Image (tube, grey):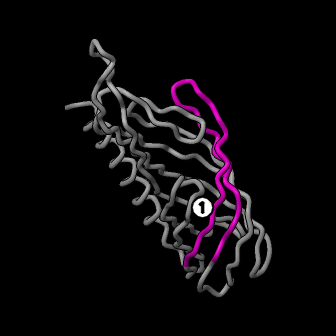
């Protein structure tokens, strides 16, 4: 089995375990939130599920991603002319975290957690792409930490919820470290 297929199989296993863990707890009287988030911990966007585990404390799981394409030039011929090939980098973060909410309908939100970035390349056999200030040059899975601070409108009786804030991600890839601060905007439904 190639390394790329092994990584995809490992990623599917991790996603299946997270979905199973979220579905096992079916106690009544707990608030559930499903929302789409633009930017944030999912980088370009993510689908999120939250469940209240204690008063004002929510457990969160999210899956997001994006792709970046770049031209990689091979200038190895004698005259310095080479050919260009396209390199596509896909990043799919799977995140687990906890968030604390304070307030009635308008709530302050603070939270954090871990994010597992599943990175894969297609196209050129060599090259790299940038994600924020990080250079990514190989397939793999990388563990990141994130925090989140923002404001949320969420009626305690359920219905539409909206959130806005900042999500700093402490990222480390191939020995490079950086803090990527992404804004986030989300729209969802509580039940």
Vertical comparison of 171 with 37: above or below: above
Q: Residue furthest top?
A: 78
The residue sitting at 57% across, 80% down in the picture is 190
Residue to which mark 1 is pinned: 59
Residue 183 lies in magenta, yes or no? yes
Residue in front for this viewpoint, 101 or 8: 8
Nearest the eye: 1 or 24:
1
Residue 84, position in %: x, y? 30, 33
Location of residue 186 (image quadrant): bottom right
Residue ID at (53%, 41%): 131
Quarter that holds the N terminus: top left
For the magenta stretch, what is the residue range? Answer: 162-188
Q: Say if residue 106 shows up in the picture.
A: yes
In the rendered image, the quadrant that contains the C terminus is: bottom right
Main SS class of the magenta portion in the image = strand
Q: Position of residue 110 (x, y in %)?
A: 74, 59
* Residue located farthest toward the left when viewing the structure as drawn: 1
184 over 179 or under it: above or below? below
Question: Residue 22: x and y, percent?
Answer: 47, 63
């Amino acid at each position: 089995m190639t390394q790329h297929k092994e990584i995809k199989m490992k990623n599917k296993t991790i996603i299946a375990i997270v979905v199973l863990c979220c579905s096992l707890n079916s106690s009544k009287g707990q608030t559930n939130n499903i929302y789409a988030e633009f930017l944030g911990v999912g980088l370009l966007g993510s689908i999120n599920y939250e469940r209240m585990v204690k008063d004002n404390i929510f457990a969160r799981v999210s899956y997001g991603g994006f792709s970046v394409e770049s031209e990689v030039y091979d200038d190895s011929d004698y005259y310095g002319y080479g050919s260009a090939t396209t390199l596509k980098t896909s990043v799919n973060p799977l995140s687990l975290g906890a968030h604390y909410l304070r307030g009635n309908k308008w709530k302050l939100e603070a939270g954090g957690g871990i994010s597992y970035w599943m990175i894969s390349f297609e196209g050129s056999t060599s090259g790299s792409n940038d994600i924020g200030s990080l250079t990514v040059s190989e397939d793999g899975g990388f563990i990141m930490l994130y925090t989140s601070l923002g404001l949320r409108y969420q009626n305690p009786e359920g219905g539409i919820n909206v959130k806005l804030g900042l999500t700093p991600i402490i990222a480390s890839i191939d020995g490079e470290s950086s803090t990527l601060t992404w804004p986030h905007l989300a729209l969802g439904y509580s039940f």
